[in-house]
Image: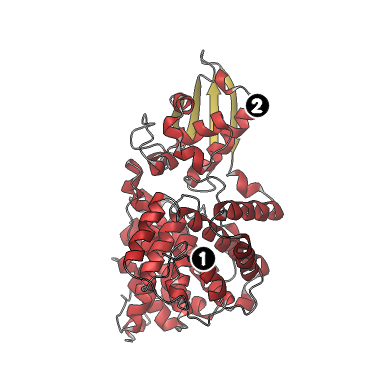
Amino acid sequence: MSNRANAGNAKRDRLAEVAVWASGLTWENVPHQVRSAASLHVLDAIGVAVRSSKLPFGRGLLDGIAASGVDARSNPRGTVIGGANCSDPRTSALVNGALIHGLEFDDTHMSSVVHGSAVVLPAAIGSIEPDDTTTELLTAYIVGWEILIRLGLLAPGGYQSRGFQTAAVCGPLGAAATSSRLKKRDDVATRNAMAISTSFAGGLMAYAADGANIKRIHLGWAAQSGIAAATLSDWGVDGATEALEGTYGFVKSFTGLDVDYGVLESLGSVWEMNNVAFKLYPCCHFIHAYIDCALELRQRLNVNSIGKLECYVHPNAIPVIGSSELGVIEARNLSSVQYNLRLCVALAACRGSVSLEGLESIDGDEEVLKFASKIEIVAAPWMEYPGSFGGFLRCYDEHGVCLDEVERKSPSATDLSEGDLEAAVMAKFHKNAQGILDDDDQRDIITHLFDPGEFRAMEWLTLLTKEA
């Protein structure tokens, strides 16, 4: 590989500094709490992907991949969650990422607005070798997550303001670091792979206007792009010297901002993995605190007495969860419902829960649709954005008298104790995997993830595949 990326010492190369950390991290240097968090997030992502594989969107992907041919089960890089092994690890990464992100049920680092598991777990699976251990997979997973978060934190909300999904744009770099780590590449090769991956970044938020499910593909595309970048680095392709910070580099091109790169310096001293939030509802994370507020209102008053309900939303979030037209409450498809604040809040208020089944059947629920028509979205510049994804509701009777108001600084899942959160995520995994993975397989997967020792990753990855 050319040393062109390291030529000259006039400018500080922060991408190279990130690569040094990524290639040098050891499992022993990862705090216990971060290890546990990583295992729980991998488990959560697997459960979501397994459930997604049985829905029409997932079945379409698996039918397509099956038609491309299957490979021997001894090749863990071809693991397709819920399907038969694929002959191409990049394609398996694409499909696994789409499955993890396919239910709007995957984890989020809120202040960076990044969904990481749907990017770095598929990149890890698509890059491991048969003898790699679960600890090696988890270490590479943590590396990718920590880098991905910091790229989002360089410009919180900045990517979205220009029409890009943050994780889709930043994802290839995190995936490239994860892939390079499992390929046992040094910091120079890792830096080059990340630089190459900046040219693969993309992911438009045009889906927000009509609920197009292309959004579900974004993160799998980022995962496969990272793997491709690591491979191309091996083949002698050079990434740009100023791929990250230059005038035409990644950050300037996707944000248009002059940013403070200091957040990159906290790698290894501040563990953002501890701040990644789980989803307890299968919809856009911006909506979760509003659902919590609606559930609280339901406990405090008769929802039939509500004549109008106001949802106060930061202006930057309105195009994402308010629909492109503020009056639209139509349930066009599942994706559109999962991004429709009115419909999700109405479902919570009327039914007392927000589940995948409830969201899927909302178009025929006249009571929920009628309640949704009472909801108004109010632009609230004083709300934190992106921040902690808080919510604020105020309701009135039919005469305009204020009945109640409720505010959540963040979704309720972030307030759970460590033990309660783990129990909730475990319950979510078992529910998602029910009827798809048998009980013994579920127990084996949990054992391997939470007590990895020297277990080979393929010992539990093979449990995730099914015959085509």
Q: Position of residue 298 (x, y in %)?
A: 61, 28
- The quarter of the rendered structure image containing the N terminus is bottom left
The label number, if any, that marks residue 300 in the structure image: 2
* Tag nearer the camera, 1 or 2: 1
Q: Is residue 122 left or right of residue 267?
A: left
Q: If you read the primary sequence from the N terminus, does the residue marked by circle 1 or circle 2 appear first?
A: 2
Distance in Å between CA atoms under marks 1 and 2: 43 Å
Looking at numbered disc 1 in the image, what kind of residue is underneath it? Leu
Residue drawn 47% across the image and 39% down it: 359
Q: Is residue 311 left or right of residue 326?
A: right
- The quarter of the rendered structure image containing the C terminus is bottom left
Q: 11 or 427: nearer the eye?
A: 427
Visible in this render: residue 243?
no
Numbered disc 2: secondary structure: helix
> Residue 447 appears in which quarter of the rendering?
bottom right
The correct choice, above or below, for 267 with respect to 189 in the image is: above
Q: 16 or 67: nearer the eye?
A: 67
Mark 1 = which residue?
464
- Other residues around mark 1 within 10 Å, as few (<14) / some (14–19) / many (≥20): many
The correct choice, above or below, for 113 with respect to 147 in the image is: above
